[in-house]
């Protein structure tokens, strides 16, 4: 009854969904099919490093993300960005499986000879075309993407360099649809208006602070509308579009939220203004999460990650007194080459231009230090492209090896560039500093420190960056160990380099996501890509041990779960055995006792649910059908990855005067754990009080718990349909101990119904030789919707002192 009521209200809410009706009015196609198909919503928080995320969580700035970690069984991974630690490289690896897709955000294209920036549509399309030529399947195939550098194979990219906004779609809509769009999202528009006023006030205050602090007046003034547009308007449009796509059932939706990265560049990663944007980002994620839970056409996972972090940086020209371009020009001249200023009096030595576009505050610095050009743009120019803590120097072709080395050493020693790198072989590079010279990747730890969290990957990735076809003849870095980070641009927060804060992002994933195939202890974009493809069924699919896998303290700890799965029909009316398996997997139990399983029943599409769940969990199982309806079976099962043998399976007595009662049964298995055989009995008792008493008397008798082979340690569990202090419960309690009463510092909790768990009718009883360490009654959103019961999880430990002789 409770299930039918909730299903009714869920369907009513879906049918009244603004996103659903708007998608229909805009004539957007829906991905119709089985509602249990996997879907994936990936949210990128641009530029938020792990250290700043943890700071925000501690200060209560992101309450929804705290909820995911505390209640929804999410795990926080370290995410290494790869190099350069910038969005175009990270998304190239994530979307196409190609490491170091670009050598920097700004560089010289080796095919055209032109200087390019990755926020330009032509540059992004050219790079993406090269990525697509690798033959790797694009991650966002048939899905949508918002505010990304690349399409990623998305059928519907929005707010990307090559596809800005919803122009074509909205232009094609008639005025009635546009009016409906505005009215249906009136609350959102009012909300945005209020936020805009508030953000404009903050932006103007920040503008005054910047000017007082010596910042450029014009740049500060330009940053006001940019901050408001990116921090509020773009974020809200991405949320609205994402909710529409979820209601349509698109298989994968990727949204890049930009506000923090913008503020961090301007004021620093720890600044109040940067962290203020995290409150709005957290609220946006919460609204998208609620949309995934109401989705009709798919079962969506929400994954949250950051592409990279940022370092608090000092601009190079402030530390050195002159710009990097001046440093390169002086080193070039002092190496015995002609002074480029004498060859190009009509050209400035330094060309600087700040651009604000697509959510990225970028400082582009290109120096053209010679006037020779063959018409292709490659010519005989000395070019400098530097952005953040990474710079590229492109020499004229006639520069010999001795001159290059002289320039490198001059930049490192005289002009205090922290690291200057030149190619030295196909699999190595030569790094020059004021403190000495190093060969990479072999001496990466000497240069960047053994305590760098990604030191095993930094060296090889830096070599790959320097050998990129578009990389400069010299690659300049603004950081090495013992130094504070420098940026070659005018900014307070920087990324793209190798510093720990720049390369250290995060990934917030459900506990059962099979993303732990790496052995390094952290993820990188390629790991996320592989996990996403598996989740979407486009690669080998399996449920792996989650990252929150418990660590047994002495090898004796045992985790047991009892769970009434309601024939795998959830409170949303969806039939989904894999969802039940995912609930179980998130808690890594050793033994699982399940009730209400269907095998071959037409009402559940003929699925062998016991077999399906065991297959997903990679466990063995024994199933006992308490009820036979011709070829259809219904009953209970015990699953385990431990050695297990069936002892007994049989029916329990009913009532002679009520022959129409549902048949009940029990299943007894013996499971070996740490050299000890544990007897486990799983059952599901009747609804009638007299029926339950007859059944528990039988279970306490000589055929079950009273049998000579049923020696401690014994576990008796299941859905007893009996509350504590009932006669059924009291009879069992005389013989065994209720784990919810035994657990230290635990207040017993109800397990039924899953939406309002006020009744404690699922129980675990134990005999001698077992100690209760911990009890958990999970109640995450996934658990609450998967069945009409909550699972009961008991963490037990063998007590050798109480075991009978010969069992220890």
Image: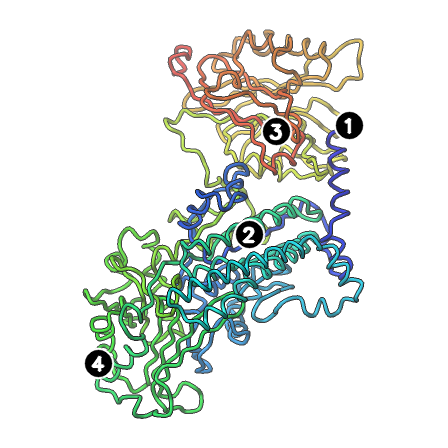
Mark nearer the N terminus (2 vs 1)? 2
Comparing marks 1 and 4, which lies closer to the viewer?
4
Residue 632 vertical position relative to residue 58 in the rendered view, above or below: above
Mark nearer the N terminus (1 vs 3)? 1
- State the CA–CA distance, disc 1 to disc 3: 31 Å
CA neighbours of label 2 inside 10 A, class few (<14), some (14 to 19), many (20+): many
Task: Please tell me in which quadrant of the rendered image residue 695 appears.
Answer: top right
Mark nearer the N terminus (4 vs 2)? 2
- State the CA–CA distance, disc 3 to disc 2: 33 Å
Q: Which residue is mark 2?
A: 280
- State the CA–CA distance, disc 2 to disc 1: 57 Å
Comparing marks 2 and 1, which lies closer to the viewer?
2
Residue 565 vertical position relative to residue 189 in the rendered view, above or below: above
Task: Please tell me in which quadrant of the rendered image residue 688 appears.
Answer: top right
Q: Please name the residue shown 42% across and 10% down the image.
A: 804
Q: Which residue is mark 4?
A: 402
Mark nearer the N terminus (1 vs 4)? 4
Query: Dot 1: what SS?
Result: loop
Q: Is residue 498 left or right of residue 578?
A: left
- State the CA–CA distance, disc 1 to disc 4: 88 Å
């Amino acid at each position: 009854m409770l299930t039918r009521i909730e299903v009714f209200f869920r369907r009513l809410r879906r049918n009244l969904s603004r996103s659903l009706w708007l998608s229909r009015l805009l004539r957007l196609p829906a991905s119709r099919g089985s509602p249990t198909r996997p879907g994936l919503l990936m949210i990128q928080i641009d530029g938020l490093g792990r250290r700043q995320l943890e700071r925000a969580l501690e200060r209560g700035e992101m309450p929804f993300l705290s909820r995911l970690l505390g209640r929804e069984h999410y795990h926080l991974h370290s995410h290494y960005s790869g190099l350069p630690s910038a969005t175009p490289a990270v998304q190239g690896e994530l979307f196409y499986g190609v490491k170091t897709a670009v050598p920097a955000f700004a560089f010289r294209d080796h095919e055209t000879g032109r200087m390019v920036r990755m926020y330009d549509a032509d540059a992004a399309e050219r790079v993406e075309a090269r990525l697509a030529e690798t033959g790797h399947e694009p991650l966002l195939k048939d899905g949508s993407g918002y505010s990304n550098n690349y399409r990623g194979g998305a059928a519907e990219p929005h707010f990307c360099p090559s596809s800005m906004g919803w122009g074509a779609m909205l232009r094609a809509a008639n005025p009635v649809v546009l009016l409906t769009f505005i009215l249906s999202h009136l609350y959102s528009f009012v909300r945005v208006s209020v936020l805009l006023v508030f953000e404009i006030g903050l932006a103007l205050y920040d503008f005054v602070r910047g000017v007082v602090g010596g910042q450029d007046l014009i740049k500060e003034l330009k940053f006001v509308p940019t901050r408001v547009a990116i921090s509020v308007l773009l974020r809200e449009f991405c949320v609205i579009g994402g909710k529409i796509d979820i209601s349509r059932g698109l298989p994968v939706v990727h949204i890049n939220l930009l506000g923090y990265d913008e503020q961090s560049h301007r004021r620093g990663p720890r600044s109040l203004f940067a962290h203020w944007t995290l409150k709005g980002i957290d609220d946006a994620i919460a609204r998208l999460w609620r949309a995934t839970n109401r989705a009709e056409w798919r079962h969506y996972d929400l994954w949250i990650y950051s592409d990279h972090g940022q370092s608090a940086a000092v601009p190079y020209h402030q530390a050195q007194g002159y710009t990097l371009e001046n440093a390169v020009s002086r080193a070039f001249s002092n190496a015995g080459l002609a002074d480029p200023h004498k060859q190009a009096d009509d050209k400035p030595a330094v060309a600087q231009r700040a651009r604000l576009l697509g959510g990225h505050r970028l400082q582009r610095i290109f120096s053209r230090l010679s006037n020779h050009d063959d018409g292709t743009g490659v010519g005989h120019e000395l070019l400098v492209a530097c952005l953040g803590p990474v710079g590229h120097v492109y020499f004229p072709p006639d520069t010999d090896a001795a001159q290059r080395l002289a320039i490198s050493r001059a930049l490192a020693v005289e002009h205090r560039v922290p690291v200057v790198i030149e190619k030295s072989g196909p699999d190595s590079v030569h790094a020059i500093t004021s403190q000495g010279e190093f060969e990479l990747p072999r001496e990466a730890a000497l240069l960047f420190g053994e305590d760098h969290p990604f030191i095993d990957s930094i060296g090889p990735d830096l070599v790959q960056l320097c050998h990129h076809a578009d990389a400069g003849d010299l690659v300049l870095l603004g950081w090495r160990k013992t130094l504070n980070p420098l940026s070659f641009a005018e900014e307070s927060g920087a990324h793209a380099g190798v510093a720990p804060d720049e390369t250290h992002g995060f990934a917030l994933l459900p506990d059962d996501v099979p993303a732990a195939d790496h052995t390094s202890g952290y993820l990188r974009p390629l790991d996320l890509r592989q996990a996403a493809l598996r989740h979407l069924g486009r690669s080998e699919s399996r449920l792996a041990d989650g990252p929150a896998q418990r660590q047994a303290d002495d090898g004796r700890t045992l985790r047991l779960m009892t769970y009434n799965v309601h024939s795998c029909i959830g409170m949303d009316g969806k039939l989904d055995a894999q969802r039940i398996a995912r609930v179980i997997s998130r808690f890594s139990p050793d033994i699982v006792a399940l009730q209400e399983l269907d095998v071959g029943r037409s009402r559940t599409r003929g699925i062998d649910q016991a077999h399906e769940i065991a297959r997903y969990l990679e466990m063995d199982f024994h199933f006992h059908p308490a009820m036979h309806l011709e070829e259809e079976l219904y009953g209970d099962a015990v699953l385990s990855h431990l050695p297990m043998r069936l002892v007994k399976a049989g029916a329990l007595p009913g009532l002679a005067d009520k022959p129409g009662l549902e048949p009940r049964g029990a299943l007894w298995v013996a499971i070996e754990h740490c050299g000890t055989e544990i007897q486990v009995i799983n059952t599901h008792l009747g609804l009638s009080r007299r029926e339950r008493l007859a059944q528990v008397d039988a279970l306490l008798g000589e055929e079950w718990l009273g049998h000579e082979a049923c020696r401690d340690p014994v576990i008796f569990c299941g859905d007893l349909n009996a509350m504590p202090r009932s006669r059924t419960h009291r009879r069992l309690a005389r013989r065994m101990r209720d784990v919810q009463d035994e657990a230290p510092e635990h207040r017993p909790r109800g397990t039924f119904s899953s939406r309002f768990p006020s009744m404690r009718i699922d129980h675990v009883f134990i005999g001698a030789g077992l100690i209760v360490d911990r009890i958990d009654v999970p109640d995450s959103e996934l658990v609450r919707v998967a069945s009409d019961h909550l699972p009961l999880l008991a963490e037990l430990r063998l007590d050798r002192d109480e075991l009978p002789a010969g069992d220890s």
